[in-house]
Amino acid sequence: MRQPSAGEALASALSAEYAAIYAYGRIGVRLSGAARDAARQAEAAHRRRRDALVVQLTTAGGVVPPDRAGYALPFPVTDRASALRLAAEVEERTAAHWRAALASTTGADRDQALAALVEYAVRATRWRKTAGLTPLTVPFPGRPT
Amino acid sequence: MVLTWPVGIGRTTQRDQTSGHSRRKLLGAGVLLVLGGTVTPLTGCDLFDRDDEPTPPPDPLRPMVDESLALAAAYRASATAHPELADRLNPIAETHTAHATELARVIGVTLPSAASAAPSTAPAADPNGARAALRALEKTAQQSATAACAAAPAERAALLGSIVAARATHQEALK
């Protein structure tokens, strides 16, 4: 399997960030109180990474994938429980994209990918805790299953 | 080759299972990184190996195998001391063993016996203290894995990234 270039890996991470931001739009409206605040903070983190990636890819002259109007969610979000489950799922999936970028990057770019993987994996654990899901952690965060 | 190596006098050889014990005794809480090269294989062969076959340098990930096993042992010890925490701690112990297994596979060594990886200190008497101690161990281990990931070749970076992230999530799960 050919290893994607750093630009391709980061473009893939950007597409994942678009989808995460879209998903949090659906998640936030089903939550209240502290969980809603946490969703807002999570969405803001994904927006920051999206913005940084757009700048980074543009500066490097790489392909900047476009955002889409909508993204297929893995399951419908109808209530608090499904919103929390989706939030955990979104974090795990975006973590997987950043994990994939580790092999294609070195130096500061790899540090950046690792920071995203760690942040999202930790947030997935937090969502699982809020949702009452077990186990709270997975052995290899971001690894395709 | 018909030569057989002398087994050495009062020393252990690479094949001697007890060598794992003497090494592991050195595994204090914070000295994990200096290991790996402390047991020189087949000391009795220096005469033959001296010039033409230098000992290959230990794999830089070798200490992480021991580190993962030591973490697993620390969790098991705390779970035994505080059975009310066992449901939370045992899955994390299994994760650390899974990391050790995967790391050993990647670097091509046999996984040392997990049973002999005794934790360096006894778990704290109160459950909260035990959890705090495990969090501190995970934090230190996350830092060492972060350094390993930054320095790793491409084919190892993803595995090490997952190990860094796992150690971070354990700190969150212990809160």
Image (cartoon, coloured by chain):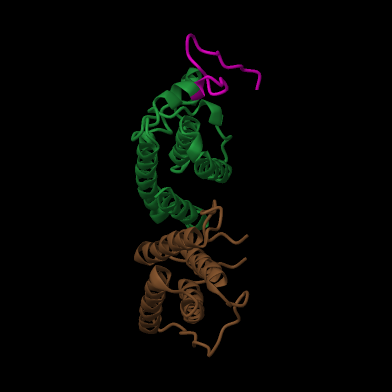
Chain colours: A brown, B green
Residue A97: x and y in percent read 51, 69
Closest to the observer: B20 or A145? A145
In the displayed structure, does residue B157 sit left or right of residue B146? right
Closest to the observer: B22 or B94? B94
Q: Is residue B148 above or below residue B72?
A: below
Residue A12: x and y in percent read 51, 75
Q: Which residues are magenta?
A: B1-20
The residue that appears at 61% across and 77% down in the rendered structure is A76
Q: Is residue B32 above or below residue B166?
A: above
Residue A65: x and y in percent read 49, 85
In the displayed structure, does residue A81 sit left or right of residue B55? right
Quarter of the image with the N terminus of chain B is: top right
Residue B85: x and y in percent read 48, 40
The residue that appears at 49% across and 35% down in the rendered structure is B79
Q: Is residue B39 visible?
A: no
- Residue furthest to the front in view is A33
Q: Is residue B9 visible?
A: yes
Closest to the observer: A56 or B129? B129
The secondary structure making up most of the magenta span is: loop
Magenta highlight on residue B172: no
Magenta highlight on residue B19: yes
Q: Is residue B111 above or below residue B167?
A: above
The residue that appears at 49% across and 63% down in the rendered structure is A99
- Residue furthest to the bottom in view is A69
